[in-house]
Amino acid sequence: MNSSGVVDMVRAAVLFDMGRTQPFVDSQPLAITDVVLDSPGVGELLVKIEAAGVCHSDLSVVTGQRPRPMPMVLGHEASGVVEAIGPDVSGIKPGDHVVLAFMPQCGRCSYCVSGRTTLCSAGAKSNGAGTLLGGGVRIRDGHGAPIQHHLGVSAFSEYAVVHHSSAVVIDSDVPLDIAALFGCAMLTGVGAVWNTAGVSEGDGVAVIGLGGVGLAAIMGAAVSGAYPLVAVDPSPEKRALARELGATHDFSVSEADEGVKGLGGVRFAVEAAGVVPALEQAFRILERGGTAVSVGLPAPSATITLPALSFVAEAKGIVGSYMGSCRPGRDIPKMISLWRDGQLPVEKLLDGEVSLSDINGALDRLEAGAAVRQIVRPNL
């Protein structure tokens, strides 16, 4: 950081246009280039990014399934160390280790006041616009043109400027590669089970789609004492990992309807695949009075077809869950405490580390289903 409070020539992975074809290692949708960060403004922090997970939500922007304003520095699941703070920041200081959560909170709208902070009106508006919660962007190219923020984080970069509500202080002894996963996968998956569904001991739970979020949901359901706990995915390797994390049964997608029916159905079915057939299957495998929880992010134009009579005659329901209906300042410390106790073995989701220069290859591996969570180390 120079004397004027600006970080010059920071390396970052910038997406200039969506929809490039695979293999991404050839089409190079993410360009590793130098950007300039403005100093943190009112209520903001400068964070040195130590670890960032490669998540399907990043991939969906690259493919154009989740349209965002361009150009943009991607990355939304991360941890790091606070380097500097802007005016009017309290409770966070330089040197603090933080987990970055992708939904900033204004603290004033009706959603925040009622405790539903993941639905914050101002946070949703700024995230959709590619700005920080305080307005505008802090990333620029070498000519001064703005570059957008991804979900208020933009962690595929050596440094990031974020709103203070995006940062949760953690103990410095928590490994930062593990800590990063609490910013998205664990919040979204575990939170969907604990907060949205409210799973209790003995409730039957199925999880469809065993990426990072789905496997986190398996962990959360196991901690809650779910039984049966069913893992559904095309990959035998991911189903085996789900068994290690607490699943009591597993089925391929084609086997799941009959397999779960043979168990009597489940009270809760968590859809974490982000595709219409998975959500429709989640509804089908419910027992009477059951609830499907939609966690994955389908294309904006996607629609589902469900039997209308089942909503009344079988009292089935469907509910959405954004970021696991979590309150990061409350839920991240709770989850980390359970990780310390061995009840949430997050480290089993890790597939190794990559540098910024290998990030397009990491996207290929994610799309191929060959990885659950790869960790980008921007400063290596």
Image (cartoon, helix red, strand yellow):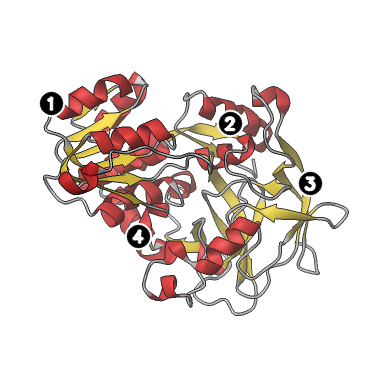
Cα–Cα gap, marks 2 and 1: 37 Å
Give the residue type that dot 3 points to.
Answer: Asp
Residue at 39% of width from left, 45% of height from top?
Answer: 295
Task: Give the percent coordinates (x, y) of residue 44.
Answer: 62, 69
Q: Is residue 313 left or right of residue 144?
A: left
Residue 363, numbered label? 2
Residue at which label 3 appears: 34
Rendering quarter of residue 222? top left
N-terminal label among 4 and 2: 4
Q: State whether residue 209 appears in this view.
A: no
User: Are discs 2 and 3 less than 8 Å apart at CB?
Assistant: no
Q: Is residue 240 above or below residue 210?
A: above
SS type, badge 3: strand
Q: State whether residue 334 appears in this view.
A: yes
Foreground residue, 45 or 26?
26
Task: Give the percent coordinates (x, y) of residue 164.
Answer: 55, 68
Residue at which label 4 appears: 331
Residue at 23% of width from left, 54% of height from top?
Answer: 198
Mark 1, Cα crowd under 10 Å, few <14 / some 14-19 / many 20+, is few
Cα–Cα gap, marks 4 and 2: 28 Å
N-terminal label among 1 and 3: 3
Task: Give the percent coordinates (x, y) of residue 78.
Answer: 53, 50
- Closer mark to the observer between disc 2 and disc 1: 1
Foreground residue, 207 or 11?
207
Residue at which label 1 appears: 262
Give the residue type that dot 2 points to.
Answer: Leu
SS type, badge 1: helix
N-terminal label among 2 and 3: 3
Cα–Cα gap, marks 2 and 3: 21 Å
